[in-house]
Amino acid sequence: MTGFLALLSRDLRLVWRRPGDVAVVLAFFVVATVLFPLGIGPQANILARIAAGVLWCTALFASMLSLDRLFAADYEDGSLDLLLLAPWPLELAALAKCAAHWIVTGLPLAALAPLLGVAFGLPPDALMALAATLLIGTPTLSLIGGLAASLTLGARRGGALLALLALPLCVPTLIFGAAAIETLMTGEDLLAHIAILAALALVALATTPWAMAAALRQAGE
Amino acid sequence: MADLHFLANPARFRRFSQRVLPGLTFATVLGFAVGLYLALLQSPPDYQQGETVRIMFVHVPSAWLSMAGYALLAALGASLLVWRHPLAALMARAAAPVGACFALVCLATGSLWGRPMWGAYWVWDARLTSMLLLFFLYLGHIALSRAYDDPDRGDRAAAILALVGVINLPIIKFSVDWWNTLHQPASLMRLDAPAIHPAILMPLLWMAGSFLLLFILLVLVRTETEIDRRRLEIADQNA
């Protein structure tokens, strides 16, 4: 556990010293989202109807965009070899990296999305639901994206390949995340959707660290 | 399983496939000759779908095989990661594009069938969408296995991906079903609404069998090619 916390705080400190990396991802999220009203037109009823889906999709793209450096820096400067040699499980190390990624992208995305939702004319309860679903859904995105990042470590054209691998696997989270906000209009149970999102996150939490560790081991050979 | 381990040696596999290939080719051609005759000439047109029902004789077997192909990829991935069978990697490399082609054939014939039946080439139906996502998973597998300068790394990364994908496929299928029922009512006509009449079922089974033989044939031939390619690469490195 000390190793987990040490790695987590190291990654957070690295980001803290170069806040620009996170700012770029958040700026991408805002700019990409703002393009949709420009492309589709300013009709308020259409924008409110598509807001949840658009925000979920752009949040997904933004978190993919930031993932290709997740293991790459450690791979290049040799820290990954030390992690492989370290006397504690590689699964925990992979999990710590994903947790750090979630704290610096998932959390800010969830905090920023309601602000953009206001611009799309979402009602207040939908804004709350949007923040809640992103808060519970983005850990899944970090874990699946982390898996894709570990699989593409050292590959040619890593970034685009990472998105090709991760996006189909993120479909369930996207569907339930975006549908949850719609339940407020149709009167269905919001909690059921949030429970399914949490279930998806737990499945990802239970399975992806093993796959990530296997991928990192063969990258280190 | 012991018999399959026996085939893990590429040289032994080659001798096996050389012996099997002529008969398999003959059986495939014969199967398609009978199956196509039954499907295109012998079987009656459907009372609702008319002649377009014949598209199903290509569409349904390719859908089955594209799904079976992904299961094969996962099984090969597991045997590569567990036993490090050198042949499993080569066969996965050979099988992935074949499975992707069957998925594409399934999507293309489905959309050609959908135009006269549903009035649109593409409908965001749950079954169509999950087949499309399966096609994307195939593309990811193919791209990943060929993305490394060292082919062994690509093979093992793709093996991990195939295992993760096979765990996720049921979840994706379930969530896409949910998504579709939420967004549009299930108003689409389904092939399986009435039990299939024997006059249609027989040609369908013949075609499915022939497609299965074709799949095995293509995978065997492509695996041999991969073995040759790997030998040439190694000879190149040593020269």
Image: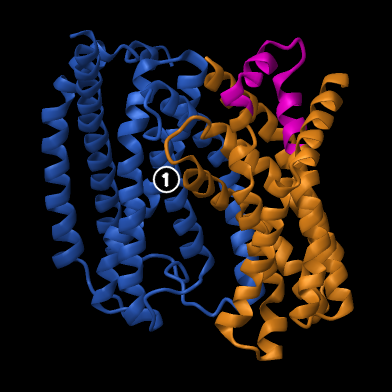
Task: Determine whether B236 is above or below A177 in the image.
Answer: above
Marked residue chain, label 1: B
Residue A20, horizontal then vertical, whole percent: 71, 49
| Residue B145 in view here | yes
Residue B86, horizontal then vertical, whole percent: 37, 16
User: What residue is at 41 percent from the left and 73 percent from the top?
Assistant: B122
User: What residue is at 16 percent from the left and 50 percent from the top?
Assistant: B32
Front-lying residue, B32 or B11: B11
Task: Determine whether B64 is above or below B157 in the image.
Answer: below
> In terms of secondary structure, what is the magenta stretch mainly?
helix
B46 horizontally vs A48: left or right? left
Residue carrying label 1: B138
| Residue B48 in view here | no
Q: Which residues are magenta?
A: A74-99
Residue A171 part of the magenta segment: no
**Amino acid type of the residue that numbered disc 1 sits on in the rendered structure:** Tyr
Residue A77 part of the magenta segment: yes
